[in-house]
């Protein structure tokens, strides 16, 4: 007998854990993903991948992964067939729809969903069939105020400025930590190298952050009091106007409402805002001058500037500073990417108007928050489940998310989940949230599905295209989310006119042997966009040609085009709109901020190189060395509270408390404590490695109260939260219970 040895194959693809989408080479043996390594031939990531990317083969092949549909029974989850799971889900959902209408259904769309074009596109037919669906996304803990600020300024939530790191000579990073996060709302592989290039060509990178982060440590650090960025940015504007640094004629060509902005900023002299920010007036003035006088400069903010008390205002102000400093839509400044499809401007206009309309008309049932890209704040999801009345959520789907750990007050959410009539999760794991499900459905991981990173196309300083086919076979019975949604909507055609139309359309197409697939749509985008083959009208790209002829991806241009603002802004004037009553109202609120007594410290977050939110703590490679969660505390605060390195501390907010071991450091502004999120895994059916790592869910300290949710974008407040910190033993001694 001869044994045929089939050599493992090497397949170029790309990582979709975070935004740079680094090129990867997958080693695949008989359909099984064996290992991953960085792709040296990728034109932009050029042989870089981080530890998480490499460790992903451990996620794909994780023994704790869900590989069949699971049904909850009195004694735990048991495997069931797809058909019996889907049949029961559909019939129970049909009951909810009959009794409560589509307002009785909720869907939480988690962060990995944004890296999954087919799941994203599949949400559209779902929402067509369930017009009153309550949609929640990770965006209300992340980026929704970026969308709202863009909607106000440019008329479309999808007009997103990206810092042109390739050409900038002064990059001011405010509330982002790209050395660890690898960039966000910015698809720039090897971002660390790009930042070092700025310095190498004689420029500067200044990091404004309450913590001397890994990024700050490699460049210049300016400490700031948490959640005071709006004060700083208003002062930068005040100085630019007051010292006549701003080129008013030029700005008038780009924007309307400059005088209004000047009036808004006038009271915020650096001498006035110093008490809030802790930044000396001279430093603010020098920075304002540098931002104007450096030909190629930009300010760039991300999660740290989004998750405070008024993140929409802060995000608006970041763009306003870029505009007034003459740094918007110019090389090295904040620039706009585009797809380059024919009629893009009109498509953007129509899309912008539609989304603005939804924002203006649709209000969340709890709190009356405007709908951002059709979604409601996840902070009020628990109350949407427990508050009786019309539109109360009775059935909830969670696809690619873990809100019990990622949104404020996971305990409240867990209690609410118990009361649902139906809960279904689609994931790789039974995470803390999915532990409450009636059914858990196994999703394919990114390497088991095709992909084209649609939402990230316009966020690349280097315009680039790459698509991938699935490189490995689905593990177990895993299915792509879009197929699960497709199956569900097909079974529910009697329950909703929208689904009936979809089902009829599907039937008609099947007569011609055509299947409605997200791929058809995304292929059309690739073909119509810059570099595309325009359906054969010219030589160029399609999905299939990208994967076949350009498996490592293809660079479309060295740089972004400047001078596109008038085409990007969807207001008829083509100019940025600065004047907004909502912004004035947010500025007025700044002076009404109050801090409860007894909570002298401020809490901030801390992303870690070997974590991805809540979901990579089960990969042994990433957890080696007995890795555990810890808080960071300034040496002076530690000394004052008799705390030393390694102590277990109790952190208490008005909303909850946690205990974590502490590391004492000088690399943080005094009065600030930093705690990573995504920890606190606990005894569910999956995640054995993660569960054994311990840690606490920092979001137990956060508030889900309607009044604590930012009003313009519905964002949770996750930074600058008032807390107090004490050594656990000290309290025990004081209580008379100690050793
Ligand atoms: N390794 C790793 N990479 C990731 C992730 C991960 O979990 N781990 N998550 C991914 C996701 S989902 C996202 S959205 C991106 C986020 O990407 P980034 O925004 O770049 O990452 P963060 O670490 O959240 O950076 C926020 C920074 O703001 C600072 N900060 C906190 N409060 C304030 C404040 O009030 N003012 C100022 N000026 N700064 C403040 C924090 O100290 C922190 O350094 O990262 C992605 N990449
Ligand atoms: N305190 C605090 N809280 C925060 C943040 C913070 O900085 N501080 N950051 C916030 C941010 S920026 C974000 S984005 C959110 C994230 O919040 P969430 O999206 O709610 O949570 P994740 O931890 O990203 O969980 C993702 C889940 O998706 C699963 N998954 C991975 N790949 C796939 C896939 O291909 N298909 C399916 N179906 N499932 C998949 C994982 O197994 C995991 O269970 O957390 C937010 N919460
Ligand atoms: S930085 Fe790491 S996790 Fe992010 S895309 Fe690249 S390899 Fe993947
Ligand atoms: Mo995020």
Image (spheres, rainbow, N blue to C red):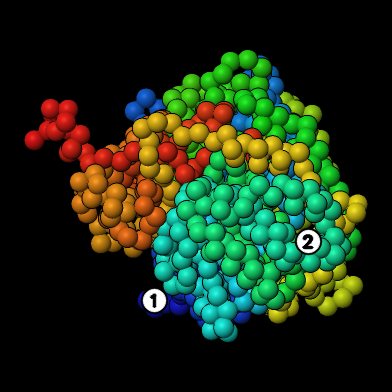
Determine whether 320 is above or below 552 in the image.
above
Q: Are marks 1 and 2 in contact (CB under 8 Å)?
A: no
Give the residue number, with chain letter if any, for mark 1. 3
Q: How many marks?
A: 2
- On the image, numbered disc 2 is attached to which residue? 525
Ligand 2 is within 8 Å of the C-beta of the residue at disc 1:
no
Q: Quadrant of residue 520?
A: bottom right
Q: Position of residue 68 (x, y in %)?
A: 46, 44
Q: Quadrant of the N terminus?
A: bottom left
Residue at point 61% right, 21% down?
A: 392
Nearer the observer, 724 or 463? 724
Classify residue 518 as left or right of residue 619.
right
Among all residues in the image, which is located at the extreme left?
Answer: 739
Residue 236, x across and y down, in percent:
63, 58
Q: Which mark is residue 249?
A: none
Res. 516 in view: no
Residue at image x 58%, y 15%?
388
Q: Quadrant of the C terminus?
A: top left
- Judge by depth and name the residue closer to the eye, 341 or 128: 341
Which residue is depicted at the point 70% across and 72% down? 463
Q: Earlier in the sequence, mark 1 or mark 2?
A: 1
Q: Is residue 654 left or right of residue 330?
A: left
Residues 291 and 306: in front is: 291
* Residue shown at the point (39%, 78%) measured from the top left: 2
What is the C-alpha distance between the residues marked 1 and 2? 46 Å
In the image, residue 495 sits, relative to residue 242, either above or below, namely above
Q: Is residue 556 visible?
A: yes
């Amino acid at each position: 007998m001869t044994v045929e040895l089939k050599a493992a194959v090497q397949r170029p693809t790309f990582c979709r854990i975070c935004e740079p989408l680094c090129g990867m080479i997958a080693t695949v043996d008989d359909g099984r993903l064996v290992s991953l390594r960085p792709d040296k031939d990728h034109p932009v990531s050029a042989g870089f991948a981080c530890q998480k990317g490499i460790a992903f083969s451990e996620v794909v092949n994780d023994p704790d992964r869900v590989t069949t549909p699971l049904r909850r029974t009195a004694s735990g989850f048991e495997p069931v067939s797809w058909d019996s799971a889907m049949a029961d889900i559909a019939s129970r959902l049909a009951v909810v729809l009959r009794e409560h209408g589509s307002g009785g259904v909720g869907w939480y769309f988690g962060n990995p969903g944004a890296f999954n074009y087919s799941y994203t596109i599949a949400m559209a037919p779902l929402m067509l069939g369930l017009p009153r669906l309550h949609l929640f996304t990770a965006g209300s803990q992340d980026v929704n105020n970026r969308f709202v600020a863009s909607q106000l300024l440019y008329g479309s939530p999808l007009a997103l400025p990206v810092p042109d790191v390739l050409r900038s000579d002064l990059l001011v990073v405010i509330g982002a930590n790209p050395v660890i996060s690898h960039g966000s709302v910015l698809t720039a592989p090897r971002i660390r190298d790009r930042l070092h290039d700025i310095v190498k060509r004689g420029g500067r990178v200044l990091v404004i952050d309450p913590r001397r982060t890994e990024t700050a440590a490699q460049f210049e650090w300016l400490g700031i009091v948490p959640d005071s960025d709006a004060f700083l940015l208003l002062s930068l504007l005040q100085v630019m106007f007051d010292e006549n640094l701003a080129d008013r004629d030029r700005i008038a060509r780009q924007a309307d409402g400059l005088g209004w902005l000047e009036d808004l900023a006038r009271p915020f002299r650096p001498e006035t805002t110093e008490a809030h920010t802790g930044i000396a007036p001279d430093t603010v003035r020098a920075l304002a001058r540098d931002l104007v006088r450096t030909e190629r400069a930009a300010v760039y903010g991300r999660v740290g500037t989004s998750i405070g008390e008024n993140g929409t205002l802060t995000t608006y102000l970041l763009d306003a500073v870029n505009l007034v400093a003459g740094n918007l839509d110019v090389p090295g400044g904040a620039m706009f990417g585009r797809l380059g499809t024919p009629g893009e401007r009109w498509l953007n206009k129509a899309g912008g108007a539609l989304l603005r309309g939804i924002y203006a008309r649709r209000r969340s049932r709890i709190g009356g928050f405007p709908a951002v890209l059709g979604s409601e704040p996840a902070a009020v999801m628990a109350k949407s489940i427990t508050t009786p009345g019309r539109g109360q959520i009775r059935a909830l789907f969670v696809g690619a998310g873990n809100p019990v750990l990622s949104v404020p007050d996971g305990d409240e959410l867990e209690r609410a989940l118990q009361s649902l009539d139906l809960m279904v999760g689609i994931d790789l794991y039974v995470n803390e949230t999915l532990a409450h499900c009636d059914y858990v459905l196994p999703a394919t991981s990114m390497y088991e599905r095709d992909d084209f990173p649609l939402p990230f196309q316009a966020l690349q300083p280097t315009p680039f295209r790459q698509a991938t086919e699935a490189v490995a076979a689905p593990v177990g019975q895993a299915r792509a989310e879009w197929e699960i949604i497709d199956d569900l909507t097909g079974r529910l055609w009697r329950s909703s006119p929208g689904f009936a139309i979809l089902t009829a359309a599907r039937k008609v197409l099947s007569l011609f042997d055509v299947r409605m697939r997200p791929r058809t749509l995304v292929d059309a985008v690739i073909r119509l966009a810059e570099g595309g083959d325009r359906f054969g009208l010219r030589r160029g790209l399609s999905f299939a040609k990208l994967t076949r002829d350009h498996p490592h991806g293809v660079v479309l241009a060295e740089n972004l085009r400047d001078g596109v603002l008038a085409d990007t802004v969807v207001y008829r004037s083509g100019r940025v709109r600065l004047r907004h009553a909502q912004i004035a109202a947010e500025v007025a609120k700044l002076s009404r901020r109050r801090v409860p007594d007894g909570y002298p410290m401020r809490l901030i977050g801390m992303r870690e190189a070997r974590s991805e939110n809540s979901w990579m703590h089960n990969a042994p490679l990433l957890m080696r060395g007995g890795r555990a969660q810890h808080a960071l505390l300034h040496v002076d605060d530690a000394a004052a509270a008799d705390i030393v390195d390694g102590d277990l501390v109790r952190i208490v907010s008005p909303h909850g408390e946690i205990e974590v071991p502490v590391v004492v450091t000088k690399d943080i502004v005094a009065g600030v404590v930093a705690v990573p999120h995504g920890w606190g895994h606990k005894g569910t059916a999956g995640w054995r490695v993660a569960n054994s790592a311990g840690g606490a869910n920092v979001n137990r300290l956060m508030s889900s109260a309607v009044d604590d949710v930012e009003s313009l974008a519905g964002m949770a407040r996750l930074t600058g939260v008032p807390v107090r910190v004490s050594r656990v033993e000290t309290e025990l001694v004081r209580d008379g219970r100690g050793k």
